[in-house]
Image: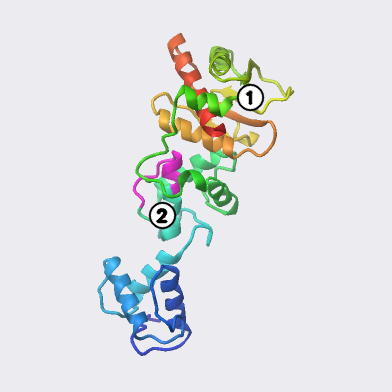
Amino acid sequence: MTIKIQRGARGPAVEDVQKRLVKLGYDLGPSGVDGVFQGATLQAVRAFQREHGLVEDGVVGPKTWAALVDATFALGDRILYLRYPYLHGADVATLQTALNVLGFPCGAVDGIFGPSTERAVREFQFNAGLPADGVAGDETLRAINRLRHAWHGRDPALPSELKRSEARVGSGIADRAVRFEWREQSLRPVCERAANLVEAISEGARATASGSSRTHDGEDVVVVLATCVDRGERLPAARLDLGDARQSVSRMATALASVHARPARIVALVDAPCSEEEAQRLAVLLVDALAAALG
């Protein structure tokens, strides 16, 4: 059936249009949602069409209806996943904004759930300790919304750049107990340097470095360094990349923010350092990311 709702129409279909317009912030005047298509409703439809590049005829046809539906989807209204034709809407745009700001780039915020968005969802899920299936369902959307303070209102074209400085490190880790564990011997220097760095610049902090252990001694955070991880482990994991420090910091912060148990236990995935200089750079990046998450 062809959709065509125009001036003079009445009934539930008009009410649906009006409710969507109100949700988008359009003023329908004193009558509000009354199921009658005239006056303020007509002007609101024309304004919506103008703002969305549609023919400004005041008629809710198939294209205007599709645009209204897209614009009124809120994140959490439905499960988002890769399919063809692609899902699209304001909820997808919100998801893309969150992913981009948090450091999981999915390209331009176009409101279309394509392959790039699915890859970014998978990467976010992996960092958050969730099944990396690329489906933005209830659990994934809850994880995104728990981090709303970090992405809402930010420019999606610019990944979160969390401040990196000794003052930040000191305030973030002060009075915390941290342990850095290595799973491969090649990562031992990184863990030891990170522990030394924390204690050198963070007042009251206690940091240790050791091989992997299942016992804990009052730590607030246990960061396990590894070059690979078994996805079945279900620990939040962050990929650290010396070539992209901003995204690495954002990803570590996301992983740590996803943990609710004590001590917070996460995996930091890194490539084995090839030199002492690289080990030091990894240690600094690791501590910066930890401070950003705890600050």
| Nearer-the-camera pick, 192 or 79 | 192
- Residues at marks 2 and 1 touching, judged by CB atoms closer than 8 Å: no
Query: 184 left or right of 65?
Result: right
Query: Residue at 36% across / 40% down in the picture?
Result: 158
Kindly identify which residue carries mark 2: 93
Residue 290 drawn at (x, y percent): 54, 28
- Find out whether residue 105 is within the magenta segment: yes
Count numbered badges in the picture. 2
- Indicate the quadrant where residue 30 lies: bottom left
Q: Amino acid at mark 1?
A: Asp
- Find out whether residue 108 is within the magenta segment: yes
**Eyeballing the image, is 61 above or below 243?**
below
Q: Looking at the image, is mark 2 or mark 1 earlier in the sequence?
A: 2
Residue 191 drawn at (x, y percent): 57, 16
Which portion, as a residue range, is magenta?
98-109
Residue 179 drawn at (x, y percent): 64, 21
Kindly identify which residue carries mark 1: 175
| Quarter of the C terminus within the rendering | top right
Residue 249 drawn at (x, y percent): 47, 31
Q: Amino acid at mark 2?
A: Ala
Query: Residue at 37% across / 83% down in the picture?
Result: 5
Q: Is residue 211 visible?
A: yes
| Quarter of the N terminus within the rendering | bottom left
- Answer few, some or many: residues within 10 Å of disc 2's Cα (few below 14, many 20 plus, some between 14 and 19): many
